[in-house]
Amino acid sequence: MLRRAIARIFWTFSRWRLVSTPAPTRPTILIGAPHTSNWDFVLMLAIAWRLQIPVRWLGKKSLFRGWRSGPMRRLGGIPVDRDDPSRVVDDVLAQIAAGEVFGLVITPDGTRTSRTGWKSGFYRIARASGLPVTLGYVDRTTMTTGLGPTIELTGDVAADMAVIREFYADKAGFRPELRSEPRLRDENGGSAGDEAAEHTAGPA
């Protein structure tokens, strides 16, 4: 497969080292964090193509205008209409019902500038769809990137986020100074309420 060959060449010559648990064999929410650079998108594709994981990712509608629509969709992009965020979950559920196995890449940081925490749309999508969450990462300090464990969310937001925080505690991102703490706005409230459409994983 052409994509796998491209990925093999990339990892052969890249300074980055791919470290991964076995690729998910069922649809999953694939967290991309810490999200601090557009290079995260390149690494995400290189990981997915090397491990042969079909990926989907959320992108703002402007990325899909004109000639860019075809290439972005072929790379797995799903355009997000922020005026109708509920369609994101509906689209994901429809693809699952059709029997597709894929990783839906979501960047909870939601931006490449420093933030005080994560947005909770990934949690809402995972709970609404029944999907597990696979912890993907980038760590500049060790020059490693890849996939960590896949976890099932329990609905106990504080407990689930404690597990996620523990995994990302030593992961610095591509630009460590822009790293955000994996913490939701209201973990103790028992719900995650940010809109799913706030998450985009594609290039700016």
Image (cartoon, rainbow, N blue to C red):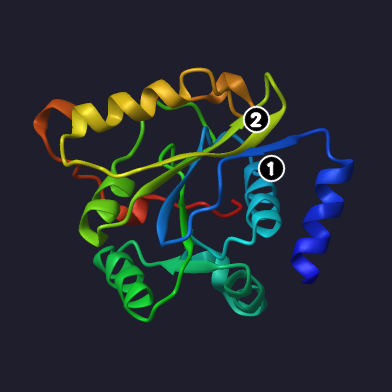
Asked if 39 appears above or below 204 in the picture, the reply is above
Task: Residue 183: tell me if it is visible.
Answer: no
Asked if 194 appears above or below 163 in the picture, the reply is below
Q: Residues within 10 Å of mark 1 (few under 14, many from 20)?
A: few
**Quarter placement of the N terminus:** bottom right
Q: Nearer the viewer, residue 32 or 159?
A: 159
Residue 32's x, y, as percent? 51, 42
Report whether 129 appears left or right of 47: left
Report whether 203 appears left or right of 126: right
Residue 30's x, y, as percent? 46, 50
Query: Which residue bears the numbered disc 1?
Result: 39
Determine the residue located farthest toward the left in the rendered image: 189
Quarter of the image for residue 171 reads: top right
The residue located at (27%, 72%) in the rendering is 90
Question: Looking at the image, do the residues carrying marks 2 and 1 touch, with CB atoms under 8 Å apart?
Answer: yes
Report whether 173 appears left or right of 122: right
Q: Secondary structure at mark 1?
A: helix
The residue located at (46%, 19%) in the rendering is 169
Quarter of the image for residue 70 reads: bottom right
Asked if 47 appears above or below 176 in the picture, the reply is below
Closer to the chain start, of discs 2 and 1, is 1
Q: Nearer the viewer, residue 127 or 110?
A: 127
**Disc 1 residue type (three-letter):** Trp
Residue 199's x, y, as percent? 40, 50
Query: Which residue bears the numbered disc 2?
Result: 174
**Disc 2 residue type (three-letter):** Phe
The residue located at (56%, 47%) in the rendering is 22
